[in-house]
Amino acid sequence: MRIEQLEYIAAVTRLGSLRRAAEELHLSQPALSETVRNLERELGVDLLERKRSGAKISDEGRELLPHIMSVLDAVDRLRGAAGDQHRISRMVRLGTVNTATVPLVIPTVREFRASHPVTQVELVGAQQADIHRGLLEGAFDLGLVNYLRGDDIPPGFETTELLCGRPVVCVRPDSPLAALGAVDADSLLAEPLVVMRSGYVMHRFVHRLLRGRTPSFSYSTDGAEMGKLMVAEGLGATVLPDFSVVGDPLERRGAITVRPLAGDATDVLLVLQRRHSGSVPRAVRDLHELFVRNAQAYGASSRRLTEG
């Protein structure tokens, strides 16, 4: 028994004649009739009632029709699921909190594109909680998130540490804070501050650093990239992980620079997460491996720059 035999029966039933079914299926009428007869012989049932005026489904065939349609519906669902899997294999979805977008993500995506020319990469900026939800629900294949050293890692994820850095003050070179060897909390409070919105790790860190005190003026934004642009435009300073700033195009051009925080030894981690799963698409594995390799190279490069 073949699927097309059932499809032919369904077409004859729907159109009411072998001739019209043959035309729609782009078959000759004798070929269609013979295919149906082969199915009838296999089942031992006359599915069609043939007359000089044409053919229509028989009483026996009408009783079997719900089963035939059930099989065809199941085949349609299988084909649809296979199509979804094919489309998924052609796209990798990455959720990121944007703390290393330019220095790490862009080179990694560029390299991935060169080796996977037909696979699209969808980058979505989101908060950590949204990325975790997306990973669990299948909306994201990979997630880039931050933790402070000592934070609990939620269960259900495979977590790979990519970068370990320190919080630094990001300022314009002409800022009064740039003249300091290290910036303490009191100095930070005296300047306008660009802070990440609630829900980001750096929002939590700055709140802890300032011990609930508020700066002279503050802005609130989503993501490090906008924060760095605001600093470059002279709106104030911001606090970010060093790996988010060192190597950034704005830092390379001299539009922004960094100063350490006085007396602070907090570790900020950038990790790559994916949901525990028995089957991981090849493209997702390849992008994961590229992130690990490029993070090692970027970490070594940024250490040379900061030590130099």
Image (cartoon, grey):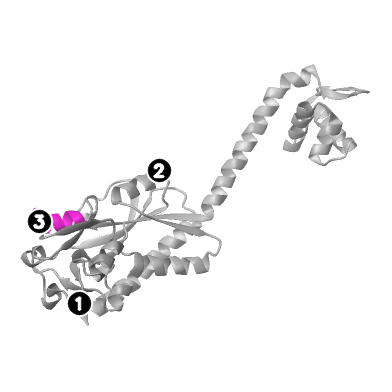
CA distance separating discs 1 and 2 = 44 Å
Residue found at the far left of this picture: 186
SS of the residue at dot 3?
Answer: loop
Compared across the picture, whether 46 is left or right of 176 comes to right
The residue to which callout 1 is attached is 173
The residue to which callout 2 is attached is 137
CA distance separating discs 1 and 3 = 24 Å
Split into 4 quadrants, where in the image is the C terminus? bottom left
Q: Residue 161 carries which label?
A: none
Answer yes or no: is residue 112 visible.
yes
Compared across the picture, whether 7 is left or right of 143 comes to right
| Residue 66, x across and y down, in percent | 68, 23
Mark 3 or 2, nearer chain start: 2
Image height check: is 41 above or below 212? above
Question: Could you classify mark 1 by the number of other residues whose Cα lies within 10 Å: few (under 14), some (14-19), or many (20 or more)?
Answer: some
What span is colored magenta in the figure?
Answer: 202-214
Closer to the camera in the image, 267 or 101: 101
**Residue 162: which quarter of the image?**
bottom left
SS of the residue at dot 2?
Answer: helix
Mark 1 or 2, nearer chain start: 2
Mark 1 or 3, nearer chain start: 1
Closer to the camera in the image, 278 or 86: 86
Image height check: is 55 above or below 207? above
The residue to which callout 3 is attached is 214
**Residue 6: which quarter of the image?**
top right
